[in-house]
Each structure stands twice: as C-alpha cells, then as structure tokens.
Amino acid sequence: MLRVVTSHYFGQSYYCSPVWLNDALSHINWNRMRSQHYRALRAAFGDYKRKMSHDLLDRLSARATPRQWSYYITAKTAIGLYLKSDTRLAEDLRSNAFINDRAPGSATFSDLSRLKVGRNQFKNRLKHMSMLKFNWTNNPSDNFIRTQLKKTFFIF
C-alpha cells in the first residue's frame, strides 16, 4: 500500500514542486500540504483511528515531509545551477553568494527582498543553504551532493 501511495499520490502532489513549493507559500497552505501528507501515510498504514504519531509515520515510511522535500529540491537545484550552468540565473546566484571563509564550502546568499513578492525570487529562497555542512563549492560529484543533501534535510 505504501508503494501505491508513494507512486500515485506523492508523484502527483509533488509534481513541479521546485516551482510552487517554497517559502513564499502561505502558512495555511503549508499546513494543508502537511495534513494531506500525513493523511496519505495513515491510509497506507491503515491507521484510520489516528493512533500513530507523525514521527512514527515518518520513520516507518521513510518519506520526506513537504518542508524537507522543499529544502532538498531547492538546494539540489541551486548547487547544480551554481556549479554547472552558464545562464543568467546562475550568474545572478554566483554574484549574490558570499563564500564563508570560516566554514569552507558553505555560502550565504544575500536576501534582497524588501517586499513579500521579492521572497519568490530563486536566490531569496536559499536561506536554508546555511544548514549544509559539506563542501559543495569545489565541484563534487552528483552522487556525493545527493547523499549529503539527504543526510542534511531528511531526518528519520
């Protein structure tokens, strides 16, 4: 049942999530996403009386919450753009990233959002990049980046 829920429900609900699942989403919509996420997991495990806690559902399913998934996919996209792309967006990211000398490989991004609409800009969605504790600025392999991002954001 978990495979069915994972393939059909989560595949549909997180489709194009890098575009719409971000910090500009309202608190009400984050709560709706979280509620639907746990409702699907409860259906997969047959917990219709709601006796399992959210922590237990997370451990049993090994599924990322909507917030964890948002952080993971945004960080993965930003690192890929930062390292491998020559587009205007990548240049904009590089110009707004301040490499931290005290913690090699970590970078902070300048938040230029004075208005709420500015929070939706890609470079202003990257405040969680300060959580990364590995060196991603010296062009590591894709597999290494993926593994380290999962260790950072997916806590089960």
Image (cartoon, rainbow, N blue to C red):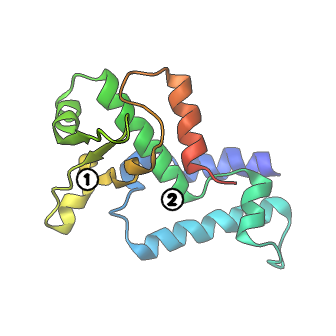
Q: Is residue 117 left or right of residue 135?
A: left
Task: Estimate the x, y position of residue 23 in percent, counting from the top left.
Answer: 36, 61
Q: Quadrant of the C terminus?
A: bottom right
Which residue reaches farthest front?
Answer: 102
Q: Which mark is residue 15?
A: none
> What element does badge 2 sit on?
helix
For disc 1, the neighbor class at 10 Å (few under 14, some 14 to 19, many from 20) is some
The structure residue drawn at horizontal position 67% and vertical position 47%, both measured from the top left corner, is: 8
Query: Are the residues flagged by discs 1 and 2 in contact, CB closer than 8 Å?
Result: no
**Is 20 situated above or below 93?**
below
> What element does badge 1 sit on?
helix
Task: Estimate the x, y position of residue 134 in percent, counting from the top left.
Answer: 47, 36
The structure residue drawn at horizontal position 39% and vertical position 47%, both measured from the top left corner, is: 129
Q: Is residue 14 left or right of residue 130?
A: right
Give the image quarter of residue 53: bottom right
Task: Estimate the x, y position of residue 102 in percent, counting from the top left.
Answer: 33, 42
Give the image quarter of residue 26: bottom left
Give the image quarter of residue 37: bottom right
Nearer-the-camera pick, 17 or 22:
22
Residue named by callout 2: 67
